[in-house]
Image (cartoon, rainbow, N blue to C red):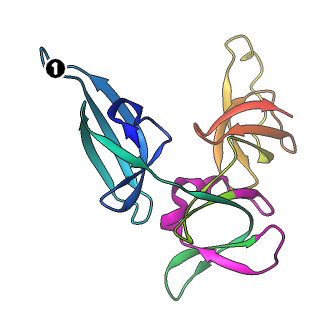
Amino acid sequence: MLAYNEIKERKYIILEKQPYEVLSSHVFRKQQRKPVNQTKLRNLITGSMRVETFHANDSVEEAELDVKKIKFIYKRFNPREKRNEFWFSEVENPNRFEITESLIGDAHRFLKDGLEIDALIFEDQIIGIKVPIKIEYKVTEAPPAVKGNSVTGANKQVKLETGLTINAPIFINEGDVVRINTETGEYVERV
């Protein structure tokens, strides 16, 4: 059980028999009243968002999620159903399975062939994925640097092997390998 002030970002809780991820939390006092924790939660099964306020005497159950290593195989567009399909396999087992785009969320931008990620499992059902915080990508498109622009620490837009476009320093060229922070979507360093 978690006390009201232990419900923080990146924790998983059970609320009304549903697993939720805590996206943000803010503990504060309103004038002379007791402290409260105002949170923003995302339902891990439906993906819906919810704002919930926990008071000093409230407590919630922490969700027990299992984690299994899986490997991203490929993504394809299904024209009949007009949606993207994301196919994975277990690392040790070649059996393929699909995870819907709604369960993957924004993490789909960082998926590349062969990438090993964690599948979050609640009651024997995959309810989401977690990509590594830092991933290396090959730069496929990078405009040439503009001469005389190096003093300001200028950035330019580069395209990665997944199709993701990011801001990177002007010394990054096509063919370079860069490390990206998947939490912020920003350039970290050249590898």
Q: Residue at x 48, y 42 (%)?
A: 11
| Badge 1: residue crowd in 10 Å (few <14, some 14–19, many ≥20) | few
What residue sits right under mark 1 in the picture? 30
**Is 76 within the magenta?**
no
Q: Residue at x 86, y 40 (%)?
A: 176
Residue 10 higher or lower than 171, as above or below: below
Q: Amino acid at mark 1?
A: Lys
Residue 81 higher or lower than 181, as above or below: below
Front residue of 77/112: it is: 112
Task: Tell me where residue 121 appears, x and y as whole percent.
Answer: 57, 64
Q: Residue at x 52, y 89 (%)?
A: 80
Residue 170 found in image quarter: top right
Q: Quadrant of the N terminus?
A: top left
Q: Which residues lie in the magenta part?
A: 90-117
Task: Tell me where residue 30 appears, x and y as whole percent.
Answer: 16, 20
Task: Tell me where residue 38 appears, x and y as whole percent.
Answer: 28, 34
**Is 107 within the magenta?**
yes
Task: Tell me where residue 139 appears, x and y as whole percent.
Answer: 79, 45
Number of dots carrying numbers = 1
Residue 35 higher or lower than 162, as above or below: above
Front residue of 181/88: it is: 88
Q: Quadrant of the C terminus?
A: top right
Residue 59 higher or lower than 20, as above or below: above
Q: Residue at x 69, y 33 (%)?
A: 187
SS at mark 1? Answer: loop
Front residue of 118/72: it is: 118
Front residue of 3/35: it is: 3
Query: Is residue 117 toward the left or the right of residue 109 in the image?
Result: right
Residue 43 found in image quarter: bottom left
